Amino acid sequence: MILATCAQAQEWPAYGGDPGNTKYSAIKQINHANVTQLKVAWTYHTGDISDGSKYPVRSTFEGTPLVVDGVMYVTTPFSRVIALDPETGKQLWAFDPKIEMDTPRNLFISRGAAYWSDGAKKRIMLGTLDGRLFSIDVQTGRPDAAFGAGGAVDLRAGVAEQYREREYGMTSPPAVYKNVIICGSLTADGTPQGPLGDVRGFDARTGKLLWTFHVVPRPGEFGHETWEGESWKDRAAANAWSILTVDTERGIVFLPLTSPGTDFYGGDRKGMGLFGDSLVALDALTGKRLWHFQTVHHNLWDYDIPAPPNLVTVTRKGKPVAAVAQVTKTGFTFLFDRVSGKPLFDIVEKPVPASEVPGEQAWPTQPVPVKPPPYARQKMRADELTDVTPESRAYCAKLMEGAVLGEIYTPIGLKPTVLFPDTNGGANWGGASWDPETHTLYVNSMDVAMLLHMVNRPEGAQIPYRVMGSGSTNSRFWDPKLNPCQKPPWAFLTAIDLDKGEFRWRSVLGVVDELIAEGIPPTGAPNLGGSIVTAGGLVFIGATNDSRFRAFDKDTGKELWVTKLPASGHATPMTFVGRMSGKQYIVIAAGGGNKYNKVYSDSLVAFSLP
């Protein structure tokens, strides 16, 4: 057991480094003194890339590789999984589930796979964009015929058979606890009725369904009373599209759930709407609910929980407390006792504005943690209009004419409303990383707004109102060069002391090269992706749309190293020590694309010391 633990400490056996999604590594070969010497060790090209010209949708390479027993496993935007020699980037095998490439979707995307072993069998568990769960033999790269039907389970069965393929799938890795594989899903959320977002546990050996947790409670179940009338029936979404977190010691799986459909109108789903937008703790073996906390009541802003929960240990009254931290799109950080669900910082119900949309009943209060302070901008004043260039200011001023500038949780009305943060946060699926040495949580965020209003739908439509962008070309509140319409900074990396609930430091994250060339100081840049923290005293992060990969001093926030990637690294990096060389490697997917970039790549890039 000691040998296994030591080996795991040198590898990266789960998406977040461990089942608790700490994204922490005890490896310290790369440190303050030598990080500037990092060089590219190898680059692997997956070949899976789409700019929207050949296929109906674009790709984004968000995969975080695993390294287990000296082999790297990485997933591609097309749901393929590839085994590599982690020290050379040489391909060992590849498995292609052959998803339908011509099906319209949001994006081609996969954030990773999971590893399971009972000591004899060793498997990669892969969820695909078209809603299948594969068990792949790590030795052969072929599906395990004993699992499901020919090596795969149809995840659409029981939740999505009557809906289009594009409306249900998996983009994040499943969670693993003992011999249970726990699956969330990506579902359509732009419609009231659609695929169910239920979270399910499957037998790791056979693929048999073991349990189902109804994210929208049915009659007789806890929380059903939070839905008015029959609004719960066939309700779309409230799913767990992000990464699940497991406390392997206590047998608890934590679910970060999204909002019920539709995102911006709730007149047909009056009530709090459990378990939408809730952090839910389940018994990982049975699926039984242990506790929950709803972070947004009756969500009207697409402020779902996008990030994996982080298992942390904090100090209270001189004693360690096992806790779970949840960062959000809103910029709030919630901290709970892992077992009881008790908040470790007070949470108050703050009164918020009512909705002016006919038929809508916005919830009168929203939960706001007293600590830590929000790491993202939550409102904008008229005098905060951008001044980076005269052209940008003039364009944004025109957009803002007549717009409603309210506090966070101001419902989108019939007039253009500035939504701050926008639907990407704040924080997003990159989430946070945790340093157990200093009890510090590191979270990257962006300050980008949207300009939205509600419009009538034709008579006979499922719902009477829908949201619409108020800008000339899109719904985001930015200029034609994709620079936000408020004064910078536009993005931060923030270090939060979770013992005290205070910021340790904040650093501007990212640059806009065109503005730097004009002599404007770093503004920060839109970002999607996450960070890792190491015992070498470093925080590594890509994420920004400036195609940079950076290392920060974890104690001060000083940027110590930066390099240019083939495209933006919209992914979470990982690290390991090579068995043959004994060298530490840092690896990140650099695929570009996504919502903030038009440069595409299929590059997986590894760095090491010379």
Image (tube, rainbow, N blue to C red):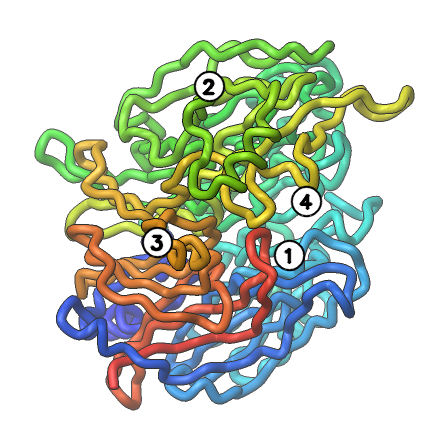
**How many callouts does the rendering have?**
4
Q: Quadrant of the N terminus?
A: bottom left
Cα distance in 3D space between marks 1 and 2: 48 Å
Crowd class of label 1 (few under 14; some 14 to 19; many from 20; radius 10 Å): some
In terms of secondary structure, where does tag 3 sit?
loop
Location of residue 433 with respect to 604 vertically, above or below: above
The residue located at (52%, 87%) in the rendering is 91
Q: Nearer the viewer, residue 534 or 159?
A: 534
Cα distance in 3D space between marks 4 and 1: 22 Å
Q: Are marks 4 and 1 in contact (CB under 8 Å)?
A: no
Marks 4, 3: nearer the viewer: 3
Relative side of 172 to 32, left or right: right
Q: Return the residue at label 2.
A: 407
Q: Return the residue at label 1.
A: 208
Crowd class of label 3 (few under 14; some 14 to 19; many from 20; radius 10 Å): few
Sequence order check: which comes first, mark 2 or mark 4?
4
x, y percent for residue 126: 59, 65
Q: Quadrant of the C terminus?
A: bottom left
Marks 2, 4: nearer the viewer: 2
Please give the label number shown on residue 519.
3
Cα distance in 3D space between marks 2 and 3: 33 Å
Q: Amino acid at mark 1?
A: Lys
Q: Nearer the viewer, residue 475 or 434?
A: 475
Marks 4, 1: nearer the viewer: 4
Q: Return the residue at label 4.
A: 187
Q: Amino acid at mark 2?
A: Glu
In the displayed orientation, state which residue is furthest to the left.
Answer: 318
Crowd class of label 4 (few under 14; some 14 to 19; many from 20; radius 10 Å): many
Sequence order check: which comes first, mark 1 or mark 2?
1
Sequence order check: which comes first, mark 3 or mark 1?
1
Q: Are marks 2 and 3 in contact (CB under 8 Å)?
A: no
